[in-house]
Amino acid sequence: MSRLKEARSTLVTRRTTFGVSAACVFAAGVATAPAAGQEAHAHTNRLIRETSPYLLQHAHNPVDWYAWGPEAFEAARSQDKPIFLSIGYSTCYWCHVMERESFEKEDIAALMNRHFISIKVDREERPDVDDIYMAAVQAMAGRGGWPMSIFLVPRTLEPFKGGTYFPPTARYGKPSFRELLTSANREWTSDRAGVTQRAGDIVVRLRRRLEATYRPQSIGQAQVNQAVASILAGYDRVNGGFGRGRTKFPQPARLELILGAAWDDPTARAALLHTLDRMAMGGIYDQVGGGFHRYSTDARWLVPHFEKMLYDNAQLALVYTRAHERTGDEFYGDVARETLDYVLREMTGPDGWFSSAQDAEVNAREGQSYVWTPAEIREALSFGGLEEHTDFVLDVYGLAGGTNFRDPHHRNEGARNILYLSQRPAVTARRLGMSLDDFNVRLRWVNEALLMARDERDQPHLDDKVLVEWNGLMIVAMVEAARVLDEPRYLEAAERAGRFLLSRLRVDTGELARTWRGGTAQIPAFSGDYAQFIAGLIALHRSTPEFDEGTRTKWLIHARRLADEAKGLFQDPAGGAYYDTRPDQSDLFVRITSMRDSVIPSANSTMLANLLDLHEITAEQSYLDDAAAALSGLSSRLRSSPASLPVAVLALKRFLDRYPDRVPGGTPAAGAIAAAPLKDPVAIGVSSETVAVGPQNPGRFEVTLRIDEGYHVNAHEPGLDELVGLTIQVVGRGLKLAADYPRGETFRTRAFSDDDIRVYTGTVTIPVTLTRTAPISGTPRFVLTYQVCTDEVCLRPARALLPVTVTAGD
């Protein structure tokens, strides 16, 4: 090991001298005019006044872009032009593609400028706008994604046409973007009344779905069990993870649920640990630099979509920290530590704030800075004085087995390697005849050499805006890791971030802002910002030693103040749940209450946990009352689809363990609202209960399903093997049944798969024909088999006996 130590000394010296990562250079302000000697841009539009990195990326397009706001709305109304709304984010690959293909083109820009008022929105700054119009696009096009492309009626901001990415020429089954613009303009100029009517109809449907109110429902341990069972039903026993589509998302909230509610179940625990192993060994984890990429494009966790998001790394660092605490497994502790070290190195600003994301592409090439060839490995190790360990790296990181990656958008370029571990470190160390300690030391040192070489490459774009919601998640992760891993530097980082948010993230009214960049705080915070920051402040309070009572009290005072603000701004006094947005937002046509823990836990789930924490810290009854009201507001969703709210399910478990009388449907406390019985979301009817079938004359009847808003039933051929399609069968001899099943609507949700599936919604009628094949014996029975799903989870398949009697006909 002496030569290895000597080589490491050389490496550290060289890295200190030369290895400054471009990702660590932070913008001090917004875009400025070109310096002397620089070429001036041919175009500069209004977005140059913005601070969002995404909007600034488009500030020199020939498109006459506006930011979302009164100026754009007034321009559209005064010029009588429809609005073209483009929503994306700075690290979105296909957003970059559409910009290069369309928004940078003079002819396309001229068409947009002539017929539309074009607006750009950063979905990370305005999740409220994104959520509403994403729901509209899904309703119109059957699927959503980014970039989002929507056309709006200027007076009402109601959508009448939309989709996602559109290519420059017709392909992928999509019209070209030029054709889309021409079609939207033609509809607006020739059929104004029809466009307005269609937009109004879309909004009516959206309001019915997004503003739905629910009576409290009886909930309990059954919902905890159902949530865990639903998640485990999608477990991939080969590769780990939950969901069997082409893409795999880490879904940290679901992992947290298994950790917190099913750890004592050996099957659930094994599924969780297998998943954590496979993710940490795969290419979705940055083996050299630490941190997780957004998701895997394959079932094996090998080939990632390379962007890195702060919220993913916060939640996954927390999961691995807690898994290490539960198991004592150093592998999980190392993953948590490396992930947080990556955040401190590449995503932490000079004043302690955490940046939002790093891009997937470099020089328009997917993952260019992360992939390797064997020759590049040798060169990097040689520069670091570690060339004798080249074979070790090629073996450990899978390069000896050949290449595994080719940029899917540039297939003509050479294949390269994504680094991954084929085995856990302890297994590989045994195979190589090394102690685990020696293996880990050698791996750390060669990783330093590789990272130094990688730092010299062109780096991914860093979106360095500060989002309160995402910073709150990272504060919690840092605090927990400091405690579990005994790393005081993580607590120091959390405290710096907390102080920065408290001092700088304020709008003019003094209330919390959502975002900050370049010295400017803006956009009044949403309920998600309040919820996650309160969680961070509570974590800081609990982590501060008792002898430092002043600091402990400070964190708690701020948490309580923000909780009071959030209650006044967002909590529905009648239903108890929290709205996403403020009551006075005039630029939205619907006020949403999110009841789904997606890539970020919902404000409702997080506030539920926060209120319980505040009650237990302060012993004040009002916090428990507010928590019980919030649980009541979520109870209908928890009853019908508990796996869609894993963080709320964990809070429900706390209620059941400590305050069972405050659970809807439990032993009622004084003044509690009685819970309504759960209603079946599907009503089934038949057109005739008596059907005559003769030797020559078929009998006919229709089956009608009326499906409640917020649910769907899998079509007869849903398109995904693990989903149960709707069928109608006859049990008995002498009859043949033929059903004319509708094809269904196209639907996509990454909770199940990245592929389209087909579903039934609303009212569905299925014609059925009966023919005699032999004398009828006994009493034929007709069985309908169907599976009800929400956006997040499918319930168990159900069977219903149809009330149809067959009589003899001519």
Image: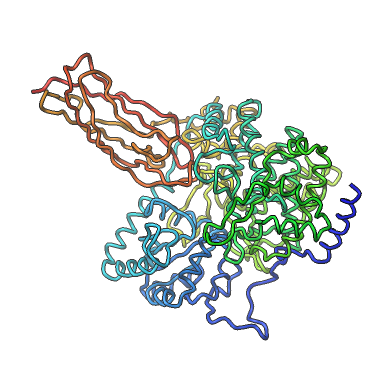
Q: Tell me if residue 406 comes above or below residue 764 in the rendering.
A: below
> What scheme was used to colour the molecule?
rainbow
Q: In what quadrant of the picture does the C terminus appear?
A: top left
- Place of residue 17 in the rendered image (x, y in percent of width and height, measured from the top left): 83, 66
Question: Would residue 354 be visible to someone looking at this image?
Answer: yes
Q: Nearer the viewer, residue 699 or 632?
A: 699
Query: Which residue is located at x 48 percent, y 37 percent?
Result: 793
Q: Quadrant of residue 336?
A: top right
Q: Position of residue 708 (x, y in %)?
A: 37, 39
Q: Position of residue 466 (x, y in %)?
A: 65, 60
Extreme residue toward the bottom, this view:
36
Near-viewer residue (763 or 229): 229
Task: Tell me: residue 738, above or below residue 375.
Answer: above
Query: Looking at the image, how many numbered discs can be counted on the residues?
Result: 0
Residue at 53% x, 46% y is 247
Q: Residue furthest right?
A: 2
Residue 272 quadrant:
top right
Give percent across and percent down for residue 121. Answer: 51, 64
Residue 537 showing in the rendered view: no
Residue sitting at x 30%, y 40%: 763
Does residue 219 appear left or right of residue 336 in this picture?
A: left
Residue drawn at x 55%, y 49% is 297
Q: Is residue 809 left or right of residue 116?
A: left
- Of residues 96 and 156, the one nearer the viewer is 96
**Image vertical order of residue 534 relative to residue 259, above or below:** below
Q: Identify whether 98 is placed above or below 646.
A: below
Q: Nearer the viewer, residue 145 or 260?
A: 145
